[in-house]
Image (cartoon, helix red, strand yellow):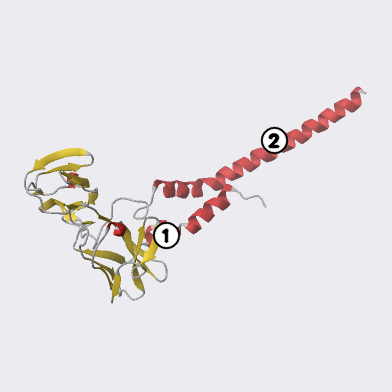
Amino acid sequence: MELTPVYWIYWILFLDSCGFTACQSPGSLIVRPNRRQFLEYESVSLSCEVQGGSTGWGVKRNSSGKRTECGDGWGRVDGTNCNISSTKSADSGVYWCQSESGEHSNTVNITVHDVILEIPILPVTEGSSMTLSCRPKETPSDLTADFYKDGSFLRTEFTGKMTIPAVNKSDEGWYWCRHPKGNSSKSWITVTDASSSPPPSSSPPSPEVSMSLSRLLVSSLLVVSPYLVTTVLLVKYSMKRNRAQGEKSLNQCVSACH
């Protein structure tokens, strides 16, 4: 059987059917303390908040390309929580909640490093105040730190803390800091409209959170492809028929010429 483009498009959509809003998950991963970056030997609590109850949900992570669940070599399950009592660099990875049926929550990228940038995971509301703190593993005598956003230098703070008194939408982006002890990892800050109700947690833009351009392209092809395939088949049939008529005429000519 010849597999037409339509077949492949339907197959892709079948495998990736939850790329549409109808498959959005009711679950959210909550991290306490409310940040993405941690120093070694800190404690972290991860919990799943789910509409209708968290029964059947658990915390999972992808660390160094290996997907495991809480209690499988890391963390300790305590009711609906997953507790990491003493973080280490191996705990860096992407964390999320997942149900037994395969539904999943937002993802949170947690890093464990010698220098961290303390910023909130939860979306920051426009007009509110926000403080970023650059903190090394050991408390130094020099707290001076440089702060960056989206690759551009913002300013130097001798206290190691930078405050934005009134956040606006343009403050959304990737932040990191530089300290004499080293650089922090980058973390995303989400800014929401004061009139809207932000979700319990937010993740930076990624294909797992919103419909990607490729999915939109597939959706468009799904609409266009039946007409495209029909046109191609008609042209192919017409060419085949013309070729057959041409060969017939050629054979007649050859017979007549002899």
Q: Secondary structure at mark 1?
A: helix
Tell me the quarter of the image containing the C terminus: top right
Q: Which residue in the protein does label 2 denote?
A: 239
Residue 97, position as x, y percentages in the image: 33, 66
Would you say 59 lies left or right of 233 here?
A: left
Would you say 186 lies left or right of 143 here?
A: right
Residue 51 sits in quarter: bottom left
Characterize the local packing of mark 2: few (<14), some (14-19) or many (20 or more) Cα atoms within 10 angstroms: few
Compute the Cα span from label 1 to label 2.
41 Å
Mark yes or no: residue 151 visible. yes
Characterize the local packing of mark 1: few (<14), some (14-19) or many (20 or more) Cα atoms within 10 angstroms: some
Would you say 25 lies left or right of 229 here?
A: left
Residue 204, position as x, y percentages in the image: 28, 52
Q: Foreground residue, 60 or 76?
A: 76
Mark 1 / mark 2, whichever is N-terminal: 1
Callout 1, which amino acid? Cys
Q: Is residue 181 above or below residue 106?
A: above
Residue 119, position as x, y percentages in the image: 17, 54
Mark 1 vs 2: CB contact within 8 A: no
Callout 2, which amino acid? Met
Extreme residue toward the right, this view:
258
Residue 111, position as x, y percentages in the image: 26, 55
Which residue is painted at 64% across and 43% down in the image? Answer: 233
Q: Foreground residue, 39 or 32?
A: 39
Q: Secondary structure at mark 2?
A: helix
Name the mark nearer the viewer: 1 or 2.
1
Extreme residue toward the top, this view:
257
Which residue is painted at 21% across and 62% down in the image? Answer: 41
Q: Which residue in the protein does label 1 denote?
A: 18
Would you say 123 lies left or right of 26 here?
A: left
- Numbered circle sitting on residue 28: none
Mark yes or no: residue 127 visible. no
